[in-house]
Amino acid sequence: MGSGPARGRNRRVNSFRALLPCLVLTALLPALADAQTLTPDMLRPVRGGFVSLEDSPLRKIAPARAEGLPEPSGDPRRTPDKPAPSRIGQLPTYGTPAANGAADVGYDSLNRKRKKPKYYPGQARPKPPVGPGSQPPPVAPVVSGRVRIAPPPSEFANKTPLPPAMAGTVAGQPLRKRLKLDDDPFGAVGDYAGSFLLKGAVELSTGYDTNPGRLAAPQGRPFYVIAPEFLAVSDWERHAVVADLRGSFNGYGQNLTPNADGTPLSAPLDIDRPGFTGHIDGRLDVSRDTRLTGQGRLLVATDNPGSPNVQAGLARYPIYTTVGATAGFDQNFNRLQVSGGATVDRTDYQWSKLTDGTKSSNDDRNFTQYGGIGRVSYEVMPGLKPFGEVQADRRVHDLYLDRNGYARNSTGGYVKAGSSFEFSRLLTGEIAVGWAERSYVDARLPRLQGLLTTASLVWTATPLTTAKYFSDTQLVETTLPGTAGILVRTHTFEVGHDFRRWLTGIGKFSYGTLDYQGNIRKDQTYSVSGDLIYKMNRNIWLKGTLRRDWLESNVPGSSTNSTVVMLGVRVQN
């Protein structure tokens, strides 16, 4: 235990030691508070890696160096007599300055102006804004000494919104399927009835024919034509049904004048003639390679004017009808295709009405035909498919003997070989050559035979010009005594050109031969025509036709000629 004064002194020393930390903190608090206050000048980099305080003499060094001026003297770091500045309250910086290695064309985070970049040949370049309303490149704003890059503008900014049908694509929506190019912008559109596409049309025409009866002494008459059409096509994923029906009626409104000497005309007095041709085709897809096919058909017509089958003294043409059906199949064996079918057709003639008021029977011209047809084809390459076809039939007449005492029952057929074409859609169709013949029960009738030619070719020479070639051979019945039949061959050449999509010109030339086997008669026919079609819209067309027909025969008084002028309108849907 010490004396009293010593104990008091020790007590004061201990109290001072306890208060010393508080005094030190009290003295340093203002300095520490000032050290935590940052100003923009503190962010300027200077030599030595420190940022000066408000009262630091180093503030004058960095601006001078940045502007290329001589540095002010009196740097305390270079004066050995003065101590180095205290690091208390100074903010150190680390690393290299911003954009130190960006060279001349690199990215600069401070957004300073740089040189334009150079590109190698073929190198992709950024696309500049195009058109009015385009957004300029984003500007980097500076906030409190820090750089903030603005986000790029939206691709839909400053653009008027468009409906999806016009814009084509919308963000977040699947791509729309491109519409198919309309090959016929003035063609009929049609209407749907269930799963069938229906198209209808009617042509109304009027004109003048210099020799409608095809007489040796021409008698001209004005005429009118009404020609309706109907087409129905199924729209199914499998199977198919197609109905194509076309009719016509030629009305003259005035009968021909009888001969002054009282001899009958080689044409009826009433020369009005109806016509109809139609067929309904069906296909049943049993499997990918097997199909069942069927067809029903109807033909309504009269004998052609000028034909020797026309009776003398007729009041009007007798009408005949042919109704038929076919049932068959198609079978594919890879590239090999085999087709076959059975056919039956029935032909009936009306009774003839004569000028004296009596009627004459045509039952001897009525017959039923039974037959079959087979075809084999092989696809050598895409667009080239050769084939071979054979057909046989038997005709049975209602009357065993005709009006002249000849037995007209017969058997016949044909064989032909050819190929179908489809080269880049420029040449399509098929062509074939063969032989056809028919043998009659009556030995007095010779065999009807001859070279068979069939063709149906379409050549698209240019997008605006199309050339077509058609050829056909038929064995036709006749009532001439001692004549087996008529071997009829026809060849048609047609060229169509679109001067405009709405203005089309068509030129046509036809040539035919009629060989009356068993008879000395030989006929040749020629026809030249020109059509001009003005398509007002999809529903209304205007049409003009000029045609010249010739019939040259080796029989005296049988040659005829005629000129036809016709104007019409076509209404379709």
Image (cartoon, grey):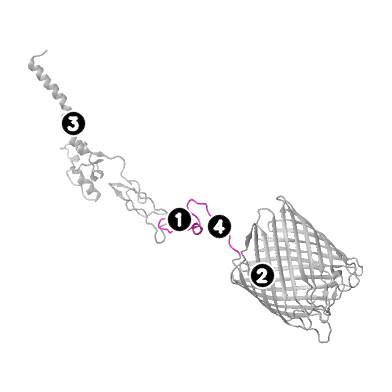
- What secondary structure prevails in the magenta region? loop
Q: Earlier in the sequence, mark 1 or mark 4?
A: 1
Q: Is residue 376 left or right of residue 32?
A: right
Where residue 507 sits, quadrant-wise, is bottom right
Contact between marks 2 and 4 (CB within 8 A): the answer is no
Q: Which residues are magenta?
A: 157-183
Q: Which mark is residue 202?
A: 2
- Nearest the viewer among 415 and 62 is 415
Q: Amino acid at mark 1?
A: Pro
Mark 3–mark 4 distance (CA, rounded to whole Å): 81 Å
Check disc 1 and report the residue beneath it.
121
Q: Which residue is mark 3?
A: 25
Label 3: how many Cα within 10 Å (few below 14, some 14–19, many 20+):
few
Q: Residues within 10 Å of mark 2 (few under 14, many from 20)?
A: some
Marks 2 and 4 sit apart, C-alpha to C-alpha, by 33 Å
Q: Earlier in the sequence, mark 3 or mark 1?
A: 3
Q: Quadrant of residue 209?
A: bottom right
Question: Is residue 523 rendered magenta in the image?
Answer: no
- Dot 3 amino acid type: Leu
